[in-house]
Amino acid sequence: MASRTFLFKILLFIAMLSIGTSQAADDIRGLLFGEADAALTAANEARAKILAPISYEKAIEYHEDASNRLKKGHSIERIKKDLANSTKFARKALESANIAKVTLAKTILARDDALRVKADKYSKDDWEDGADNFLSAVRRLESGSLKKAMKSASRAEKYFRSAELDAIKINYLTEARQLIAKAYDDDIDDYAPLTLTKAKLLLKEAEKELSENRYDLDRPRSLARNAHYEASHAIYIAKLLKPVDDDDVTEEQLVLALEKPVTDIAGSLDLVAALDRPVEALVETMVSSISALQKKSHELNVRLEEITALEKSVDKLEKRLGIQSQTLAKQEENRKRFQRVEQQFTTQEAIVLTQGNNILIRLVGLSFRPAQAAIEPQYFALLKKLENILEVYPNATAVLEGHTDSFGGDAANLTLSQQRAESVRSYLLANIDKRNPNSIRSVGYGESRPIGNNETFAGRAKNRRIDLVIKML
Protein backbone atom coordinates (compact mmCIF):
# COMPACT_ATOMS: atom_id res chain seq x y z
CA MET A 1 0.00 0.00 0.00
CA ALA A 2 2.86 2.39 0.90
CA SER A 3 4.56 1.72 -2.44
CA ARG A 4 1.33 2.56 -4.32
CA THR A 5 0.96 5.82 -2.44
CA PHE A 6 4.58 6.70 -3.17
CA LEU A 7 4.09 5.86 -6.86
CA PHE A 8 0.95 8.03 -7.05
CA LYS A 9 2.83 10.99 -5.54
CA ILE A 10 5.69 10.54 -8.05
CA LEU A 11 3.24 10.46 -10.97
CA LEU A 12 1.45 13.50 -9.63
CA PHE A 13 4.75 15.39 -9.26
CA ILE A 14 5.84 14.50 -12.82
CA ALA A 15 2.46 15.59 -14.23
CA MET A 16 2.68 18.93 -12.43
CA LEU A 17 6.15 19.57 -13.81
CA SER A 18 5.22 18.66 -17.37
CA ILE A 19 1.86 20.47 -17.83
CA GLY A 20 1.59 22.86 -14.93
CA THR A 21 0.29 22.35 -11.41
CA SER A 22 -3.32 23.60 -11.90
CA GLN A 23 -4.00 21.79 -15.18
CA ALA A 24 -2.42 18.56 -13.93
CA ALA A 25 -4.54 18.55 -10.82
CA ASP A 26 -7.65 19.14 -12.92
CA ASP A 27 -6.77 16.31 -15.31
CA ILE A 28 -6.09 13.82 -12.52
CA ARG A 29 -9.27 14.85 -10.74
CA GLY A 30 -11.26 14.38 -13.95
CA LEU A 31 -9.96 10.83 -14.35
CA LEU A 32 -10.79 9.90 -10.77
CA PHE A 33 -14.05 11.82 -10.16
CA GLY A 34 -15.83 11.54 -13.52
CA GLU A 35 -18.31 8.82 -12.57
CA ALA A 36 -19.03 10.25 -9.10
CA ASP A 37 -19.54 13.76 -10.50
CA ALA A 38 -21.98 12.47 -13.10
CA ALA A 39 -23.95 10.58 -10.45
CA LEU A 40 -24.18 13.70 -8.27
CA THR A 41 -25.27 15.84 -11.23
CA ALA A 42 -28.11 13.41 -11.97
CA ALA A 43 -29.11 13.46 -8.30
CA ASN A 44 -29.11 17.26 -8.23
CA GLU A 45 -31.28 17.43 -11.34
CA ALA A 46 -33.78 15.15 -9.60
CA ARG A 47 -33.79 17.47 -6.54
CA ALA A 48 -32.39 14.66 -4.40
CA LYS A 49 -31.06 17.14 -1.84
CA ILE A 50 -34.70 17.86 -0.93
CA LEU A 51 -36.41 14.59 -1.83
CA ALA A 52 -33.80 12.05 -0.66
CA PRO A 53 -31.73 13.83 2.01
CA ILE A 54 -30.31 10.74 3.77
CA SER A 55 -28.63 9.21 0.73
CA TYR A 56 -27.77 12.59 -0.75
CA GLU A 57 -25.97 13.75 2.41
CA LYS A 58 -23.89 10.57 2.46
CA ALA A 59 -23.04 10.98 -1.23
CA ILE A 60 -21.85 14.54 -0.57
CA GLU A 61 -19.92 13.48 2.53
CA TYR A 62 -17.99 10.76 0.69
CA HIS A 63 -17.40 13.10 -2.27
CA GLU A 64 -15.92 15.80 -0.02
CA ASP A 65 -13.73 13.23 1.74
CA ALA A 66 -12.35 12.13 -1.63
CA SER A 67 -11.63 15.73 -2.61
CA ASN A 68 -9.79 16.40 0.65
CA ARG A 69 -7.75 13.20 0.34
CA LEU A 70 -6.74 14.13 -3.18
CA LYS A 71 -5.53 17.54 -2.06
CA LYS A 72 -3.47 15.95 0.72
CA GLY A 73 -2.02 13.28 -1.56
CA HIS A 74 -3.60 10.32 0.26
CA SER A 75 -3.81 6.80 -1.05
CA ILE A 76 -5.41 6.56 -4.49
CA GLU A 77 -7.16 3.39 -3.39
CA ARG A 78 -8.76 5.20 -0.46
CA ILE A 79 -9.86 8.05 -2.76
CA LYS A 80 -11.38 5.54 -5.18
CA LYS A 81 -13.20 3.85 -2.31
CA ASP A 82 -14.72 7.17 -1.17
CA LEU A 83 -15.76 7.96 -4.71
CA ALA A 84 -17.34 4.52 -5.14
CA ASN A 85 -19.40 5.14 -1.99
CA SER A 86 -20.34 8.64 -3.20
CA THR A 87 -21.50 7.20 -6.53
CA LYS A 88 -23.47 4.45 -4.80
CA PHE A 89 -25.34 6.85 -2.51
CA ALA A 90 -25.89 9.43 -5.29
CA ARG A 91 -27.57 6.75 -7.39
CA LYS A 92 -29.60 5.62 -4.43
CA ALA A 93 -30.61 9.26 -3.81
CA LEU A 94 -31.67 9.57 -7.45
CA GLU A 95 -33.83 6.45 -7.18
CA SER A 96 -35.39 7.62 -3.90
CA ALA A 97 -36.05 11.10 -5.31
CA ASN A 98 -37.90 9.64 -8.29
CA ILE A 99 -40.04 7.55 -5.94
CA ALA A 100 -40.77 10.64 -3.81
CA LYS A 101 -41.85 12.61 -6.88
CA VAL A 102 -44.64 10.11 -7.44
CA THR A 103 -45.52 9.20 -3.85
CA LEU A 104 -45.44 12.77 -2.47
CA ALA A 105 -46.51 14.59 -5.63
CA LYS A 106 -49.27 16.67 -3.97
CA THR A 107 -47.04 17.75 -1.11
CA ILE A 108 -44.18 18.66 -3.46
CA LEU A 109 -46.58 20.73 -5.55
CA ALA A 110 -47.84 22.51 -2.43
CA ARG A 111 -44.25 23.26 -1.40
CA ASP A 112 -43.38 24.62 -4.86
CA ASP A 113 -46.55 26.76 -4.96
CA ALA A 114 -45.73 28.21 -1.55
CA LEU A 115 -42.18 29.06 -2.60
CA ARG A 116 -43.47 30.69 -5.79
CA VAL A 117 -45.27 33.36 -3.72
CA LYS A 118 -42.36 33.66 -1.23
CA ALA A 119 -44.20 32.00 1.63
CA ASP A 120 -40.86 31.33 3.30
CA LYS A 121 -40.57 35.11 3.68
CA TYR A 122 -44.16 36.19 4.31
CA SER A 123 -45.49 33.26 6.37
CA LYS A 124 -42.46 31.95 8.24
CA ASP A 125 -44.23 29.97 10.97
CA ASP A 126 -46.44 27.89 8.66
CA TRP A 127 -43.59 27.52 6.18
CA GLU A 128 -41.19 26.21 8.83
CA ASP A 129 -43.81 23.80 10.18
CA GLY A 130 -44.41 22.59 6.65
CA ALA A 131 -40.68 22.25 5.97
CA ASP A 132 -40.15 20.22 9.18
CA ASN A 133 -42.97 17.83 8.32
CA PHE A 134 -41.81 17.57 4.71
CA LEU A 135 -38.28 16.66 5.84
CA SER A 136 -39.76 14.03 8.13
CA ALA A 137 -41.88 12.67 5.24
CA VAL A 138 -39.00 12.30 2.77
CA ARG A 139 -36.69 10.78 5.41
CA ARG A 140 -39.33 8.25 6.43
CA LEU A 141 -40.10 7.42 2.82
CA GLU A 142 -36.41 6.93 2.10
CA SER A 143 -36.13 4.67 5.15
CA GLY A 144 -39.04 2.53 3.91
CA SER A 145 -41.75 3.71 6.32
CA LEU A 146 -44.46 4.59 3.81
CA LYS A 147 -47.37 4.93 6.25
CA LYS A 148 -45.56 7.37 8.54
CA ALA A 149 -44.20 9.24 5.53
CA MET A 150 -47.71 9.83 4.19
CA LYS A 151 -48.91 11.17 7.56
CA SER A 152 -46.05 13.66 7.70
CA ALA A 153 -46.62 14.59 4.05
CA SER A 154 -50.29 15.29 4.72
CA ARG A 155 -49.42 17.64 7.57
CA ALA A 156 -46.74 19.32 5.47
CA GLU A 157 -49.19 19.91 2.62
CA LYS A 158 -51.66 21.67 4.96
CA TYR A 159 -48.94 23.93 6.35
CA PHE A 160 -47.62 24.75 2.88
CA ARG A 161 -51.08 25.60 1.57
CA SER A 162 -51.76 27.77 4.59
CA ALA A 163 -48.42 29.54 4.16
CA GLU A 164 -49.13 30.04 0.46
CA LEU A 165 -52.51 31.63 1.14
CA ASP A 166 -51.08 33.93 3.80
CA ALA A 167 -48.30 35.00 1.44
CA ILE A 168 -50.75 35.72 -1.37
CA LYS A 169 -52.91 37.80 0.97
CA ILE A 170 -49.89 39.75 2.15
CA ASN A 171 -48.67 40.34 -1.41
CA TYR A 172 -52.01 41.56 -2.70
CA LEU A 173 -53.87 42.91 0.32
CA THR A 174 -51.37 44.45 2.72
CA GLU A 175 -51.02 47.83 1.01
CA ALA A 176 -54.78 48.24 0.69
CA ARG A 177 -55.35 47.15 4.30
CA GLN A 178 -52.73 49.59 5.60
CA LEU A 179 -54.09 52.50 3.58
CA ILE A 180 -57.66 51.84 4.76
CA ALA A 181 -56.48 51.65 8.38
CA LYS A 182 -54.59 54.94 7.97
CA ALA A 183 -57.68 56.56 6.42
CA TYR A 184 -59.74 55.64 9.47
CA ASP A 185 -56.99 56.85 11.80
CA ASP A 186 -57.04 60.20 9.96
CA ASP A 187 -60.87 60.45 10.31
CA ILE A 188 -61.38 60.29 6.55
CA ASP A 189 -64.72 58.58 7.21
CA ASP A 190 -66.01 61.93 8.50
CA TYR A 191 -65.80 63.25 4.92
CA ALA A 192 -66.10 60.19 2.65
CA PRO A 193 -67.83 57.40 4.60
CA LEU A 194 -69.42 55.78 1.54
CA THR A 195 -66.18 55.61 -0.44
CA LEU A 196 -64.17 54.32 2.51
CA THR A 197 -66.83 51.70 3.25
CA LYS A 198 -66.66 50.63 -0.40
CA ALA A 199 -62.89 50.19 -0.05
CA LYS A 200 -63.42 48.06 3.03
CA LEU A 201 -66.00 45.85 1.28
CA LEU A 202 -63.76 45.40 -1.76
CA LEU A 203 -60.91 44.32 0.50
CA LYS A 204 -63.18 41.83 2.26
CA GLU A 205 -64.36 40.43 -1.08
CA ALA A 206 -60.75 40.10 -2.25
CA GLU A 207 -59.90 38.10 0.89
CA LYS A 208 -62.90 35.86 0.28
CA GLU A 209 -61.92 35.26 -3.35
CA LEU A 210 -58.39 34.33 -2.34
CA SER A 211 -59.65 31.90 0.28
CA GLU A 212 -62.09 30.21 -2.08
CA ASN A 213 -59.98 30.15 -5.24
CA ARG A 214 -56.35 31.09 -4.76
CA TYR A 215 -55.35 29.96 -8.27
CA ASP A 216 -57.39 32.51 -10.20
CA LEU A 217 -55.62 35.65 -9.02
CA ASP A 218 -56.97 38.08 -11.63
CA ARG A 219 -60.17 38.87 -9.76
CA PRO A 220 -58.77 39.15 -6.20
CA ARG A 221 -55.83 41.19 -7.47
CA SER A 222 -58.23 43.55 -9.22
CA LEU A 223 -60.41 43.76 -6.12
CA ALA A 224 -57.40 44.55 -3.95
CA ARG A 225 -56.27 47.27 -6.36
CA ASN A 226 -59.76 48.74 -6.42
CA ALA A 227 -59.86 48.67 -2.62
CA HIS A 228 -56.59 50.59 -2.57
CA TYR A 229 -57.95 53.00 -5.17
CA GLU A 230 -61.19 53.66 -3.24
CA ALA A 231 -59.21 54.30 -0.04
CA SER A 232 -57.04 56.80 -1.96
CA HIS A 233 -60.22 58.19 -3.49
CA ALA A 234 -61.73 58.72 -0.03
CA ILE A 235 -58.57 60.52 1.11
CA TYR A 236 -58.77 62.78 -1.95
CA ILE A 237 -62.44 63.55 -1.31
CA ALA A 238 -61.60 64.46 2.27
CA LYS A 239 -58.83 66.75 0.98
CA LEU A 240 -61.41 68.54 -1.19
CA LEU A 241 -64.08 68.81 1.49
CA LYS A 242 -61.95 69.74 4.49
CA PRO A 243 -61.34 73.34 3.29
CA VAL A 244 -65.14 73.75 2.95
CA ASP A 245 -65.59 72.37 6.45
CA ASP A 246 -62.95 74.79 7.71
CA ASP A 247 -64.65 77.71 5.89
CA ASP A 248 -61.55 78.30 3.75
CA VAL A 249 -63.51 77.60 0.55
CA THR A 250 -67.20 78.01 -0.19
CA GLU A 251 -69.32 75.19 -1.58
CA GLU A 252 -69.86 77.20 -4.77
CA GLN A 253 -66.12 77.65 -5.26
CA LEU A 254 -65.64 73.90 -4.86
CA VAL A 255 -68.31 73.10 -7.49
CA LEU A 256 -66.82 75.59 -9.94
CA ALA A 257 -63.35 74.10 -9.45
CA LEU A 258 -64.70 70.61 -10.14
CA GLU A 259 -66.50 71.82 -13.27
CA LYS A 260 -63.35 73.24 -14.84
CA PRO A 261 -61.84 69.90 -16.02
CA VAL A 262 -65.18 69.00 -17.64
CA THR A 263 -65.21 72.35 -19.43
CA ASP A 264 -61.60 71.83 -20.59
CA ILE A 265 -62.37 68.36 -22.00
CA ALA A 266 -65.48 69.62 -23.78
CA GLY A 267 -63.47 72.48 -25.26
CA SER A 268 -60.82 70.09 -26.60
CA LEU A 269 -63.63 68.19 -28.35
CA ASP A 270 -65.01 71.46 -29.80
CA LEU A 271 -68.16 71.16 -27.68
CA VAL A 272 -69.95 73.78 -25.60
CA ALA A 273 -69.98 72.79 -21.92
CA ALA A 274 -73.58 73.55 -20.97
CA LEU A 275 -73.41 73.25 -17.19
CA ASP A 276 -76.74 74.93 -16.51
CA ARG A 277 -78.36 71.50 -16.82
CA PRO A 278 -77.57 67.96 -15.59
CA VAL A 279 -74.00 67.02 -16.50
CA GLU A 280 -75.01 63.54 -17.72
CA ALA A 281 -76.15 64.89 -21.10
CA LEU A 282 -72.79 66.62 -21.63
CA VAL A 283 -70.89 63.50 -20.61
CA GLU A 284 -72.90 61.38 -23.05
CA THR A 285 -72.14 63.84 -25.85
CA MET A 286 -68.41 63.79 -25.00
CA VAL A 287 -68.35 59.99 -24.93
CA SER A 288 -70.04 59.86 -28.35
CA SER A 289 -67.50 62.35 -29.71
CA ILE A 290 -64.59 60.32 -28.38
CA SER A 291 -66.05 57.12 -29.88
CA ALA A 292 -66.39 58.86 -33.22
CA LEU A 293 -62.78 60.04 -33.02
CA GLN A 294 -61.61 56.52 -32.21
CA LYS A 295 -63.49 55.18 -35.22
CA LYS A 296 -62.03 57.86 -37.49
CA SER A 297 -58.57 57.04 -36.17
CA HIS A 298 -59.09 53.37 -37.01
CA GLU A 299 -60.36 54.23 -40.47
CA LEU A 300 -57.44 56.59 -41.02
CA ASN A 301 -54.97 53.85 -40.09
CA VAL A 302 -56.65 51.51 -42.57
CA ARG A 303 -56.47 54.18 -45.28
CA LEU A 304 -52.81 54.82 -44.51
CA GLU A 305 -52.07 51.12 -44.85
CA GLU A 306 -53.85 51.06 -48.20
CA ILE A 307 -51.97 54.16 -49.40
CA THR A 308 -48.65 52.67 -48.29
CA ALA A 309 -49.38 49.50 -50.22
CA LEU A 310 -50.22 51.52 -53.31
CA GLU A 311 -47.12 53.69 -53.01
CA LYS A 312 -44.87 50.63 -52.97
CA SER A 313 -46.14 49.67 -56.43
CA VAL A 314 -45.95 53.12 -58.06
CA ASP A 315 -43.00 52.10 -60.25
CA LYS A 316 -45.12 49.31 -61.76
CA LEU A 317 -48.27 51.38 -62.13
CA GLU A 318 -48.11 51.84 -65.90
CA LYS A 319 -47.75 48.11 -66.55
CA ARG A 320 -50.55 47.28 -64.14
CA LEU A 321 -52.87 50.20 -64.80
CA GLY A 322 -55.81 48.02 -65.69
CA ILE A 323 -55.43 45.91 -62.56
CA GLN A 324 -54.90 48.97 -60.38
CA SER A 325 -58.08 50.55 -61.70
CA GLN A 326 -59.99 47.43 -60.75
CA THR A 327 -58.46 47.59 -57.26
CA LEU A 328 -59.52 51.20 -56.76
CA ALA A 329 -63.01 50.39 -57.99
CA LYS A 330 -63.26 47.51 -55.57
CA GLN A 331 -62.08 49.71 -52.71
CA GLU A 332 -64.79 52.24 -53.52
CA GLU A 333 -67.37 49.46 -53.63
CA ASN A 334 -66.20 48.21 -50.24
CA ARG A 335 -66.42 51.74 -48.82
CA LYS A 336 -70.03 52.13 -49.90
CA ARG A 337 -70.88 48.67 -48.56
CA PHE A 338 -69.30 49.56 -45.23
CA GLN A 339 -71.41 52.73 -45.02
CA ARG A 340 -74.59 50.73 -45.61
CA VAL A 341 -73.73 48.37 -42.77
CA GLU A 342 -72.69 51.20 -40.45
CA GLN A 343 -76.00 53.00 -40.91
CA GLN A 344 -77.90 50.01 -39.54
CA PHE A 345 -76.66 50.53 -35.94
CA THR A 346 -76.62 53.22 -33.29
CA THR A 347 -73.36 53.78 -31.38
CA GLN A 348 -74.98 52.10 -28.36
CA GLU A 349 -75.70 48.95 -30.41
CA ALA A 350 -72.51 48.31 -32.34
CA ILE A 351 -69.23 49.73 -33.55
CA VAL A 352 -68.60 48.98 -37.22
CA LEU A 353 -64.98 48.82 -38.39
CA THR A 354 -63.13 47.65 -41.47
CA GLN A 355 -60.53 44.88 -41.62
CA GLY A 356 -59.08 45.13 -45.10
CA ASN A 357 -61.96 44.12 -47.36
CA ASN A 358 -63.84 42.60 -44.43
CA ILE A 359 -66.31 44.22 -42.04
CA LEU A 360 -66.05 43.91 -38.25
CA ILE A 361 -69.24 44.50 -36.26
CA ARG A 362 -68.49 44.84 -32.54
CA LEU A 363 -71.77 44.23 -30.72
CA VAL A 364 -71.33 46.57 -27.75
CA GLY A 365 -75.07 46.51 -27.12
CA LEU A 366 -75.21 42.73 -26.62
CA SER A 367 -74.57 41.51 -23.09
CA PHE A 368 -74.78 38.21 -21.21
CA ARG A 369 -75.41 37.42 -17.57
CA PRO A 370 -72.28 36.41 -15.60
CA ALA A 371 -71.11 32.90 -16.53
CA GLN A 372 -74.17 32.46 -18.83
CA ALA A 373 -74.45 32.04 -22.60
CA ALA A 374 -78.22 32.37 -23.10
CA ILE A 375 -79.44 35.32 -25.20
CA GLU A 376 -82.06 37.42 -23.41
CA PRO A 377 -85.17 38.69 -25.28
CA GLN A 378 -84.20 42.40 -25.05
CA TYR A 379 -81.38 41.71 -27.55
CA PHE A 380 -83.55 40.12 -30.25
CA ALA A 381 -84.04 43.47 -32.02
CA LEU A 382 -80.26 43.96 -32.27
CA LEU A 383 -79.77 40.44 -33.62
CA LYS A 384 -82.54 41.09 -36.15
CA LYS A 385 -80.30 43.78 -37.65
CA LEU A 386 -77.54 41.19 -37.98
CA GLU A 387 -79.97 38.90 -39.79
CA ASN A 388 -80.78 41.67 -42.28
CA ILE A 389 -77.11 42.36 -42.96
CA LEU A 390 -76.23 38.71 -43.47
CA GLU A 391 -79.15 38.29 -45.87
CA VAL A 392 -77.73 41.16 -47.95
CA TYR A 393 -74.40 39.28 -48.20
CA PRO A 394 -75.46 35.67 -48.82
CA ASN A 395 -72.10 34.69 -50.33
CA ALA A 396 -69.96 36.07 -47.52
CA THR A 397 -68.57 33.97 -44.68
CA ALA A 398 -69.55 35.22 -41.24
CA VAL A 399 -67.40 34.46 -38.20
CA LEU A 400 -68.79 35.07 -34.72
CA GLU A 401 -65.98 35.63 -32.22
CA GLY A 402 -66.62 35.24 -28.49
CA HIS A 403 -64.46 37.08 -25.95
CA THR A 404 -64.36 37.40 -22.14
CA ASP A 405 -62.58 39.51 -19.55
CA SER A 406 -59.73 38.07 -17.47
CA PHE A 407 -61.82 37.11 -14.43
CA GLY A 408 -62.12 33.35 -14.05
CA GLY A 409 -59.82 30.54 -15.16
CA ASP A 410 -58.36 30.51 -18.67
CA ALA A 411 -60.02 27.22 -19.63
CA ALA A 412 -63.42 28.25 -18.25
CA ASN A 413 -63.27 31.58 -20.10
CA LEU A 414 -62.35 29.86 -23.35
CA THR A 415 -65.34 27.52 -23.01
CA LEU A 416 -67.71 30.35 -22.06
CA SER A 417 -66.62 32.52 -25.00
CA GLN A 418 -67.20 29.62 -27.41
CA GLN A 419 -70.64 28.93 -25.91
CA ARG A 420 -71.68 32.58 -26.28
CA ALA A 421 -70.50 32.77 -29.88
CA GLU A 422 -72.32 29.52 -30.64
CA SER A 423 -75.53 30.87 -29.01
CA VAL A 424 -75.54 33.83 -31.41
CA ARG A 425 -74.76 31.55 -34.35
CA SER A 426 -77.63 29.19 -33.47
CA TYR A 427 -80.02 32.12 -33.12
CA LEU A 428 -79.07 33.56 -36.52
CA LEU A 429 -79.31 30.20 -38.31
CA ALA A 430 -82.72 29.61 -36.77
CA ASN A 431 -84.02 32.94 -38.09
CA ILE A 432 -82.35 33.26 -41.50
CA ASP A 433 -83.93 31.28 -44.34
CA LYS A 434 -81.86 29.39 -46.89
CA ARG A 435 -78.51 30.12 -45.28
CA ASN A 436 -75.81 27.50 -45.58
CA PRO A 437 -74.87 26.65 -41.95
CA ASN A 438 -71.22 26.35 -42.98
CA SER A 439 -71.21 30.02 -43.99
CA ILE A 440 -71.64 31.11 -40.35
CA ARG A 441 -68.93 29.93 -37.99
CA SER A 442 -68.27 30.52 -34.29
CA VAL A 443 -65.01 30.62 -32.39
CA GLY A 444 -64.12 31.44 -28.77
CA TYR A 445 -60.97 33.32 -27.82
CA GLY A 446 -61.57 33.53 -24.06
CA GLU A 447 -59.58 36.33 -22.45
CA SER A 448 -56.72 36.23 -24.98
CA ARG A 449 -57.75 39.25 -27.11
CA PRO A 450 -58.65 42.15 -24.82
CA ILE A 451 -59.55 45.56 -26.26
CA GLY A 452 -59.92 47.22 -22.86
CA ASN A 453 -58.06 47.35 -19.56
CA ASN A 454 -59.01 44.32 -17.44
CA GLU A 455 -58.12 46.28 -14.29
CA THR A 456 -61.15 48.59 -14.74
CA PHE A 457 -64.88 47.88 -14.76
CA ALA A 458 -65.38 49.68 -18.07
CA GLY A 459 -62.43 47.85 -19.62
CA ARG A 460 -63.71 44.45 -18.56
CA ALA A 461 -67.15 45.32 -19.98
CA LYS A 462 -65.51 46.08 -23.35
CA ASN A 463 -63.71 42.76 -23.29
CA ARG A 464 -66.91 40.74 -22.67
CA ARG A 465 -68.11 40.94 -26.24
CA ILE A 466 -69.24 39.25 -29.43
CA ASP A 467 -67.60 40.38 -32.69
CA LEU A 468 -69.02 39.50 -36.08
CA VAL A 469 -66.54 39.45 -38.95
CA ILE A 470 -68.07 39.43 -42.44
CA LYS A 471 -65.45 38.03 -44.79
CA MET A 472 -65.98 39.04 -48.40
CA LEU A 473 -64.98 36.72 -51.21
Image (tube, grey):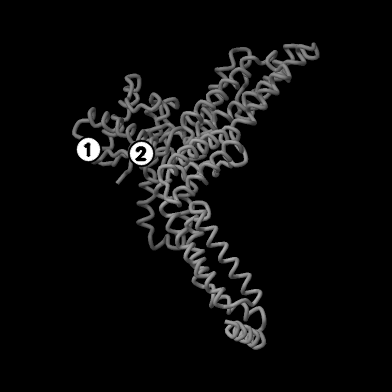
Circle 1 SS class: helix
Amino acid type, callout 2: Gly
Residue position marked by numbered label 2 in the rendering: 444
Q: Is residue 144 above or below residue 394?
A: below
Q: Is residue 362 visible?
A: yes
Circle 2 SS class: strand
Identify the image quadrant of residue 375.
top left
Q: Is residue 413 or residue 443 the one in the foreground?
A: 413
- Among numbered discs 1 and 2, the one appearing first in the sequence: 1
Q: Residue at x 62, y 24 (%)?
A: 230
Residue 38 screen position, x and y as percent: 49, 68
Q: Is residue 36 or residue 471 the one in the foreground?
A: 36
Residue position marked by numbered label 1 in the rendering: 437
Distance from the alpha carbon under mark 1 to that under mark 2: 18 Å
Position of 423 with respect to 238 (left or right) is left
Q: Within 10 Å of the Cα at label 2, are there few (<14), some (14-19), or many (20+) other Cα atoms?
A: many
